Image (cartoon, grey):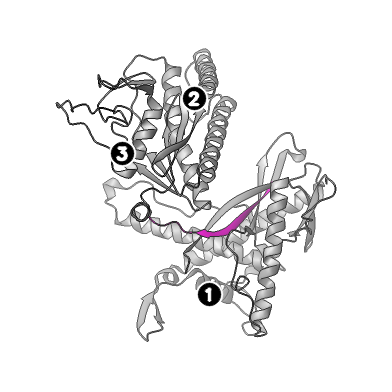
Amino acid sequence: MRALAAVIKTIRIGIHREVHRCKTEALEMTKDIYNQVIAFYMDFFTAHLNVLDEPVQVRKKDGTVKERTRTNQELLTFAEFHTLATKAHPNPGWPLDEHVPAAEGMPTELRRAAINQAIGKVRSWWSHLKTWEETAPDQRGREPRPGAPNEPVTFYAGMVEHPAYDLNPQKKKRHTFISLKLHTGQKWEKVSLPVVVHAQAEGLLAGSALEKERIARERKRSKTGQAGSGEEKGGSGAGTWVAKSLTVYGKRDKRYPGGMRYALHIPMEKSVDKPRKAEEQRRANPQMPVVAVDLGVGRLAVMGAFVEGRLAATRFVDGRALNHRRHRLLTVIHRKRKQSGRLQPGVQDNANLWNKIRNLDENAAKQTAVAIVRFAREHGARVIVFEHLRRYRPPKEKMSRSDRKNHKRAYWLRGQIMEWVRDLAFREGILTVERNPAYTSQVCPHCKVLGERNGSRFTCKNPNHRYNADADFVGMMNLYRKWTKTFVYPRKGDDPKPEVA
């Protein structure tokens, strides 16, 4: 039986800037009511903290009894029983309609989304508070408080009506519509929001709609007792993205009417084959395809694909243009700081320039990560080997303030690249591992003699070899040696005997 793991990515769909003012007001009103309901249930659970820690006895299949705390679903049922009026229980102790009158007629799934938000917030606050109380008084910080909620509205997948996407569109559409149930000031009703769906999102949503139809057919068939074919049994198929709960985000933007820009964030989930542990894969197939990646400051990445123990392909990702552009922006920031004098506490300086620098780094990290994962997929690699990143250590040579800041941000960029690669590679069933970076750019990968690194160049000291290459390329080769456990560490004070290449 295959071991499957669920991976998630989020697609962003912008609401058209020419959306009617009544619809934007409905979005704002729905968000206010949603947060009022969250605040109400936070107060409810704060008044019933014993329910969070009260043990519940559960009987297992083998007949034994164990104790556990209540699950989120059990807490949700407890909250609905004490706050909603029903025929069996017409007079609840904490009526929601009296505290939040606008919540009358609120969609059930939207209300449950608010309850789940409240449960998560109260659980987190209660855990932090107990830790704070157990801490010594002289080591305590500020007492944790629940705080007022200000959450974007989450719509479960069943509450959203997507248009019937055509997998083979015959013409380009300017925009389409997605229907959500919002509060329009008088009542809750469906509101069609014009959204701009890009080609990639349209394809994902179309595939998700087909997959949901297949799952619905299989559920109906299982209820009627008819057996499905082998591939159609069960839930979501492996390799198919399925849309989950949708969230509406609002961001201040002067370019949009009303100063607010709205977007829909839709998480997409699919099942992939869970990769085995790295050591198991290496023992099972020592000659398996592997990609080794050396991340640097001057070059963002030097990657090499090793197939059957031989270097099959190499690719360099240059980062000099990015470093130069970031250095120019940092120089402008420091020059403006000198002109403005002392910085005011709590006031961010040069916000637009700092945002531009952050966007540059994030965009470079994403593009580099995509290139690394695509390179690994092209050569059939199931493992990507990185060097383990250590804490930043400033260079010994004298540098200007802009140079030091630029060097530090270039070093931090390597961590961002690794995070993106780890996420993107797992979606493809590729594992990422880290190895000790010691001596990777100082030892010859062929004769295993300690060489000399001068800037970006490496020179082997073996008189019978005289190997000269790029230092990042040498680091990439030695990372693969560390994966195969054939790397030889030089001993201090001992010049190893040179081996003839």
Which image quarter: residue 157?
A: bottom right
Mark found first going from the N terminus, 1 or 3: 1
Magenta residues? 263-278
Badge 1 vs badge 2, beta-carbon distance below 8 Å: no
The residue singled out by tag 1 in the image is: 78
For badge 2, the amino acid type reads Gln
Q: Is residue 28 visible?
A: no
In front: label 1 or label 2: 1
Which image quarter: residue 310?
A: top left
Please tell me whether mark 2 sits on a helix, a strand or a loop. Answer: loop
Instruction: Determine the CA span between mark 2 and mark 3.
Output: 43 Å
What's the residue at 41%, 20% (across, down)?
404
Residue 273 is one of the magenta-drawn residues:
yes
What's the residue at 25%, 19% (across, down)?
463
In front: label 2 or label 3: 3
Residue 494 percent across, percent down from the top left: 15, 27
Query: Height in image: 280 above or below 291?
Result: below
The residue singled out by tag 2 in the image is: 344
The residue singled out by tag 3 in the image is: 436
